[in-house]
Amino acid sequence: MTQPPGQPPHGAFGAPQDQPPPGGGFGAPQQPPVQGGFGAPQPQPGYGYPQQPASAPGPYAQPAGPYGTPGPGPYGPQPGYGYPQQQPQYPGAPGGPGTAPPSGGSGTGGGPFRGKPALIVAAAVAGLLVVGGTVYALTGQGDGRKPVAQRSDDPKASGTGTPVNPGDGSGDGGADPENLNAGRKSGEAKVLWYKSAPDAPASGADAPGMWITGKTAVKAAYKQVFAYRAANGDPAWAPITFPQKICAVTPRKSADDKVVVAYMNGTSDRAKCNQLQEIDLDTGRKGWTATVADGGLFDSALSIELTLSGKTLMVGRSESGTAYDLDSGHKLYDKKKYGAACFPTAFAGGTDRLIEVASCAAGGSAEHDEISQLDPATGRVEWTRPIKKGWTVERTYSVDPLVVYLTNEEKKAWNISVMDGKGTFRSEVKVNEKFAPQCGLAILARDLQGCQGVAVDANTLYLPTDVSGGGNEIVAISLTDGTAKWRTKSPTDESMYPVEVEGGKLVAYVRPSYDAGGQVVSIPTTGAAHPATKLLQNPQHTADIEGGFYDGAVDWADGRFYLSATRLTGSDDAKEKLMMAFGN
């Protein structure tokens, strides 16, 4: 089913509200900038803004389908609550189209949650298939220059150069050969280690995935998977090299620290992303392998997505999915066409939960999406919720609890909805705000779990606001009624983004600026006040390196902060950045 132009529906589960796409922000699909990174382009005004209730039913007012007819409530037409609100350009939508994300303050370079906001690409305007909520983050310099840091003649004099410690395991890790800590001031964290990227073709290459275990930090880039000791960056095991480029990975690791990597079976235009390899992140042991079969007509493995749910690996094609046992690699079952021309198009997984999104009756008058929950081990359908015609399920901000981001191309509206464990509408976001989570580019697939800069716990959704300059806010939104519980402002003039909830507190990342490194802060999730307490102050000496990671991904584990590139430009101007770690 053609994806709507990255414009999210307003509101939440319940009738989507008509609203124009907000100008930017994590969430709404943005027009892909040349480069990504935290700080993806933000949606234009309208997206993400709470919409005025429309009379039309919301995305959950479902059309009749194989799993039953539309029911009342948020899934059927209802006035007010849940209806998409009408708004120009989806203002306020998460990652809405139209506006680029604010570069924030005077920070330099792109990088995690940094860079110019990506614009939502409307299918009608740009002719591209864009997944709702997609934010294309720009990582270029604030002045529009190419985001490639040039190495300083004297690495001790400045931290703005590009270190050359290779990411191929040959570097000496914690020895800090580039003297990145030479200019560290009192109170600043250390650069624990830094790795530059392997050579990539001039056309660029993907560097997907970043997995942190209690022992290792593992990163995929182009044709290789690298592993470093988390504490000091020393090689943990020899790089694994594949015969062709890596084309998909499981974004999350299993409970026992396993992942699956997919790589191409050739280099021609007809080559497929169908070769699977299981890897143990702690030891580097290569486990089982498999070749993904094609589905039916127009359903080949040219492009796939990998999703983990407990011990089940789901391999999603454009119109079907195949499940494998993660321990053995044995095929478990297929998910294929069902009912009135419904084809599975995307999957999202959690610890013991597997969500399927299907496109039904594409091109017909009854065209609509459906959300189903599957038993990960057997594929049995536990419940199905049809979505009202015109609405597309673009992202899952969380699987448990299930928080879904939808868009309506015709209405230029977005909607963030919450569903309970039985598929019943629980609430929708009703906060009138422009949000800016960072969502990756998804053209050939929906990439349901491709967003950063958003966090969810049992009762609350945490979203960053989009601002045109200066510091933004993080808004805590109740999953019970969709209203704002509290909000807290960034401690600096740079934007702040949720990373995860840990020990009852929200961990967030504050972008670096010209005169200061980034920060990792902790925010109480309960109580009357929600001040940001600094956990790490990254060094000013390396702020330019930190802010220059191309298409950055971040993680916080065991008191250490990691960031890495997710795309390599293939530029020969300087050694590209791959991964960096900070700690005390």
Image (cartoon, helix red, strand yellow):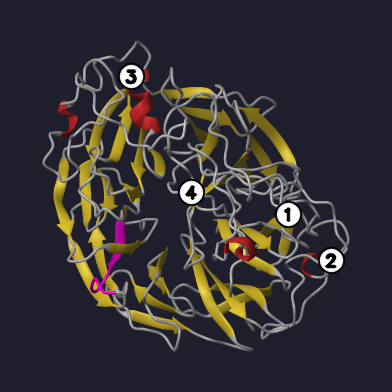
Q: Separation of disc 1 and disc 2 at Cα?
A: 13 Å
Q: Is residue 497 left or right of residue 546?
A: right
Q: Is residue 433 left or right of residue 317?
A: right
Dot 1 lies on which element?
Answer: loop
Determine which residue is flagged by label 2. Answer: 56
Determine which residue is flagged by label 3. Answer: 541
Mark with earlier residue (4, 1): 1
Q: Separation of disc 3 and disc 4 at Cα?
A: 28 Å
> Which quadrant holds residue 6?
bottom right
Amino acid carrying mark 4 in the image: Pro
Answer few, some or many: residues within 10 Å of disc 1's Cα (few below 14, many 20 plus, some between 14 and 19): many
Answer few, some or many: residues within 10 Å of disc 2's Cα (few below 14, many 20 plus, some between 14 and 19): many
Mark with earlier residue (3, 2): 2
Q: Quadrant of the C terminus?
A: top left
Determine which residue is flagged by label 4. Answer: 33
Membership of 261 in magenta stretch: yes
Q: Separation of disc 4 and disc 2 at Cα?
A: 34 Å
Amino acid carrying mark 1 in the image: His
Task: Please identify, in this view, whether the residue under mark 4 or under mark 2 is nearer the observer.
Answer: 4
Q: Is residue 150 left or right of residue 370?
A: left
- In the image, is residue 461 above or below residue 393? above
At a point 58% along the width and 26% down the height, the residue shown is 490
Answer few, some or many: residues within 10 Å of disc 4's Cα (few below 14, many 20 plus, some between 14 and 19): many
Amino acid carrying mark 2 in the image: Ala
Residue 400 seen anywhere in this rendered image of the structure = no
Determine which residue is flagged by label 1. Answer: 10
